[in-house]
Amino acid sequence: MIENMMFNGMSAASPLQMNSGAAQVQETPGQAMEQFGSYLQDAISQVGAQEQQVHKMNDQFLVGKVDVDQLMIASEKSMLGLQLTAQVRNKAIEAYQEIMRTQL
């Protein structure tokens, strides 16, 4: 099963998780936006790390230290992460364009 590195290790302060309990702390929109921004930044850095790992594995494959199936799995994970990042970017651009088209 392919495991996506972008969604692993989500912190307890993640905006995608719901707070439970009696003592809920209200976040300001600025704080929520900052958390979301840092989440996206972490996700993009993980995609970059996957790409670097594939390049290292490719070099190791050329000298015979890595099997072809390990290299292919790593490259597919990296490609899927990049495709997911591109789709998130496309949706963000579409949302921005839709907001700009709204009339006040």
Image (tube, rainbow, N blue to C red):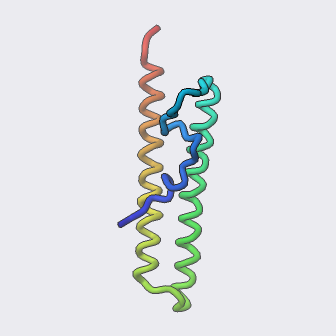
Position of 4 relative to 60 (above/below): above
34 sits left or right of 84 in the view: right
Position of 53 relative to 88 (above/below): below
Residue 43: x and y, percent?
55, 51
Which residue, as the protein is rendered here, is positioned at the far front?
22
Q: Between residues 66 and 19, which one lies in front from this camera angle?
A: 19
Residue 57: x and y, percent?
54, 78
Give the image quarter of residue 2.
bottom left
Which residue, as the protein is rendered here, is positioned at the far left?
1
Q: How many labels does the image show?
A: 0
Give the image quarter of residue 97.
top left
Position of 25 relative to 53 (above/below): above
Residue 51: x and y, percent?
54, 65
Which residue, as the protein is rendered here, is positioned at the far top?
104
Position of 82 relative to 65 (above/below): above
At a point 45% along the width and 48% down the height, the residue shown is 86
Which residue, as the protein is rendered here, is positioned at the far bottom?
64
